[in-house]
Image (cartoon, helix red, strand yellow):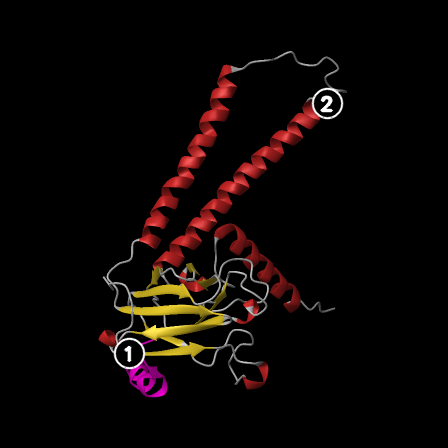
Amino acid sequence: MRIETSGLRSATTLTAAAVALVLGGSEAFAEAGRPSPWELGMQGMVTEVGQNLSTFHTYLVWIITAVSVFVLGLILTIVFRFSEKRNPVASKTTHNTLLEVVWTVVPVLILVAIAIPSFRLLRLQLITPPADVVVKVTGYAWYWGYEYPADQGGGFKFDSNMLEAKDLKPGQTRLLSVDNAMYVPVNKVVKVQVTAADVIHSFAMPSFGVKIDAIPGRLNESWFKAEKEGVYYGQCSELCGNGHPYMPIEIHVVSEQQYAAWLQDAKKKYASVDGPIQLANAQ
């Protein structure tokens, strides 16, 4: 009698990987660039900020799990040990100095253990290193506009709209692929200066660890340094109207040679900018 075990092995492997993903922070099923079916953790991170963000998230999960298990165990112990049946005479204890010191000091230590790496991550996110590339991103209802400054080989701007299902080509992703993607070179610091022309939007790229609001009349900025070539997707993450689900972001991270070639083609393809693009200091 032969028992087919391949399906069992596959299920066991999948379960083990899923548990490792939740508890150990493994990114075995976290595809970089786009969400994956049945994804249990974050997308694969390809920037220093994103990797630190993912590590911090896993660290918090362990702390939250430990606190939750401790509280659950405490509740069950109290329910079992101090039930009316086992303790017909109620305890008269009203004060315990050691216990009060412990339940004051321990939460403070936990908060300190969370605050220190949190502040380090915030500093990494907020202090932009000298930029190699600057791109101005403008949110519209409901698409994105990109501007590349002339002093960095650009001097053009273009709009980026989601491709409809009927226009998709093999390899493109429904609701995420666009007609004109943003291009950046790999291993270069890219500063994105974000604003909006109408309502509040939000420029979010999960694999880069970037999410920044696009607010009319205000110029916000963030940065990323993608360490791996590929196609990465994001979306508007601020409810901005009935076209909100159809504002994807597509960024191609390419080699320096490919980026230089794209710049030359883009100058011919896209509209040139009359006069200098109004960007903040790249440094």
Alpha-carbon neighbours of circle 1 within 10 Å: few (<14), some, or many (≥20)? many
Q: Nearer the viewer, mark 1 or mark 2?
A: 1
Camera-side residue of 56 and 234: 234
Task: From the top left corner, tell me how far across and down residue 26 is, in percent.
Answer: 48, 57
Question: In the rendering, which numbered label is found on residue 83?
Answer: 2
Camera-side residue of 113 and 19: 113
Q: Considering only order in the chain, which callout, 2 or 1, is on the residue closer to the N terminus?
A: 2
**Magenta span dominant secondary structure:** helix
Quadrant containing the C terminus is: bottom left
Q: Where does the magenta region start and end?
A: 254-274
Task: From the top left corner, tell me how far across and down residue 111 is, in percent.
Answer: 44, 36
Quadrant containing the N terminus is: bottom right
Camera-side residue of 121 and 194: 194
Q: Residue furthest right?
A: 85
What amino acid does circle 1 point to? Answer: Gly
Q: Is residue 142 visible?
A: yes
Residue beneath the point at 48% across and 23% down? 102
Alpha-carbon neighbours of circle 2 within 10 Å: few (<14), some, or many (≥20)? few
Quadrant hosting residue 4: bottom right
255 part of magenta stretch: yes
Read off the residue under disc 1: 155
Name the side, left or right, on which 87 lies relative to 188. Answer: right
96 part of magenta stretch: no
Q: Is residue 251 visible?
A: no
Name the side, left or right, on which 39 lies relative to 114. Answer: right
Residue beneath the point at 62% across and 35% down? 72
Camera-side residue of 190 and 216: 216
